[in-house]
Image (cartoon, rainbow, N blue to C red):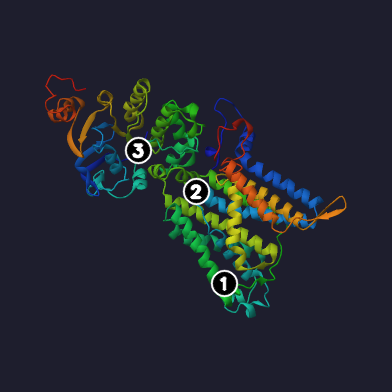
Amino acid sequence: MSVSPLSPHAPATTDRGPAERLLRCWFPVLALIVPLFAVAIVSDLAGSVMIQRTVTEALIRIVVVVGIYVFVGNTGVISFGSVTFMAIAAYATGWQTCCEALKPITMPGLPEFLRDHSYSLFPAALAAVALAALAAFVTGLVLMRMSGLAASISTLAVLFIVNVVYSNWDSVTMGTASMVGLPRYVTLWVALGAAVLAIVVAWLYQSSRFGLAVRATRADEVAAAACGVSLYRARLLAFTLSGALMGLGGVLTAHFLGTVSINSFFLKLTFIALAMLVVGGMGSLAGAVAGVVVTSVVIDVFRRLESGFSIAGANWSLPAGTQELVLAGVMLLILIYRKDGLMGGREFHWPSNRGKIAGT
Amino acid sequence: MTTQTLQTLEARDVHISFGGIRALSGVNMKLRRGVVFGLIGPNGAGKTTMVNVLSGFQRPTSGTVNLDGADASGIGPQKMARAGIGRSFQAARLFRDMTVEQNLMVAAFGAGLPAARAARAAHEILEWMGLAAAAGKRCDTLSYGDERRVSIARALALDPAFVLLDEPASGMNDAECDALMHTIAHLPARFGCGVLLIEHNMKVIMGVCDRVHVLDGGRSLAEGTPVEVQNDPTVRRAYLGEKAAPKSAALF
């Protein structure tokens, strides 16, 4: 995947060094990654354990929302089923890494290679992500033949199907009970690394010929077909890559919490993640990241205020539920005044290009 | 210069009916590389339908579309594009949130060009069409005339053996139109492709085309060189009516 020919380029009249061209080309990514690094460093040095957990959670959410964005943002088709692939990967990594002694009792239906063996964390994570990608590919083979709304609703069907299967497959998934005892290796820095990886992968994809093709179908399906773009293949690739990133999000969630339960990968997560994407603006990678950051800050601040604070010696606390109401209010305001989200479908660009090139 | 080997694009006895309404009835036409082929006819004659058939967007109810003689009916627009049939649309249909250059890159990649060659092809086409300065502009900021020209440039970026241009000059003023027709007349020499041109302005089409095909009510009325078509009595009748077509009348 070569990036440079598609990326924002300097006006032909000015001569620029390769270093500056590289910087210009990767600026939209750096503008997202560098602040994340800064936040991580500050919270690692100065933050309490609580703050570090909050930041880690937000970084994991970035992986998840970027994962959804890779499909939804690039194709323009809303997917309600993306968190399904988180669940698939979370269970897959759980089966490979958790509680070797308990597995034969709690999950006797697992195949022998999972029931009686444990695997090291990294290969397990890779295998889980690969399984999520494979699951996305296979469902995509069917779903991506449908157009706009039908495809969206059918992704919701996938969410329900997997939820029902995992909730009832007691001998393999422990039903609706939680699988516990997963190694908790997802620290602030692991989450940061994953978030950076997700952002870079999403950027490479959308800057590639495949990303360009799928964004063409988003803008005009008919014209894209006339340009030789296969709508089906372009969307299938986006869905598969999105599935892989969702899988990464699932693995991180599982090894951050140490537990996996199917109902944490259902409607609530689906809608909060989509809401984050909408708030930031689903047309750009910057929108996906900004949406997570803004909503995470709102959620965290008001959650703290709900649990109590003191002003001038007196203790105060906001009524429970304030956080949800404020979040809903913020979303409404953004949708009313900026219907394309905070970023309005644009990336951060090198200053001299501002306004000229965007939406890429 | 295109790398396509395709030499002819041919419609054989094409019929199209939309729920009882016959849009095309037994139309035959053959496009050759290096030739500008004009398609004229009054509103509703079936010209755009014909372009849709030739570019794979519309499957003939009966009859075939042939690429170098091989039946390609119903292979769909994407495969037609890959086979070397580029087209523009009456309503430009640019990818509005992308830059001009990116619009061309979509087509160049669609044709299967590797990145470096695609970028070079896009650059050369924009340069040739005088659009180089607009390369980095988002398409939703373009003027109407530029939109139309980018739409043609994008069709060319597909590295096509044939480009089908559906009223590329509609809505342009006379000067813009003249300039565009000059460009279109030179497409075969510059890109080695064949051109199908739909245009309402007869004067324009007679000046640019090597061959002209006249459609009326979904039927072929006549085909020939511009002069032959101008002098064809059936064409004169169709355009001017039976009585109003004395031999001396200047039709075009």
Q: CA distance from mark 2 to mark 3?
A: 24 Å
Q: Dot 1 falls on which chain?
A: A
SS for callout 3: strand
Residue under label 3: B87
> Which residue is found at the position 26% from the left and 43% from the top?
B68
Residue under label 1: A167
Q: Nearer the viewer, mark 2 or mark 3?
A: 2
Place of residue B238 in the rendered image (x, y in percent of width and height, measured from the top left) = 17, 31
State whether residue A220 is above or below residue A149. Answer: above
Could you tell me if the residues under marks 2 and 3 are in contact, i.e. CB atoms within 8 Å?
Answer: no
Q: Quadrant of residue B183?
A: top left
Q: Quadrant of residue B26?
A: top left
Residue type marked 2: Gly
| A30 relative position to B184: left or right | right
Place of residue A227 in the rendered image (x, y in percent of width and height, measured from the top left) = 40, 42
Q: Nearer the viewer, residue B147 or A105?
A: B147
> Which residue is found at the position 25% from the left and 45% from the top?
B65
Give the total of numbered labels. Answer: 3
Place of residue A238 in the rendered image (x, y in percent of width and height, measured from the top left) = 50, 52
The quarter of the rendered structure image containing the C terminus of chain A is: top right
Q: Which mark is residue A76?
A: 2
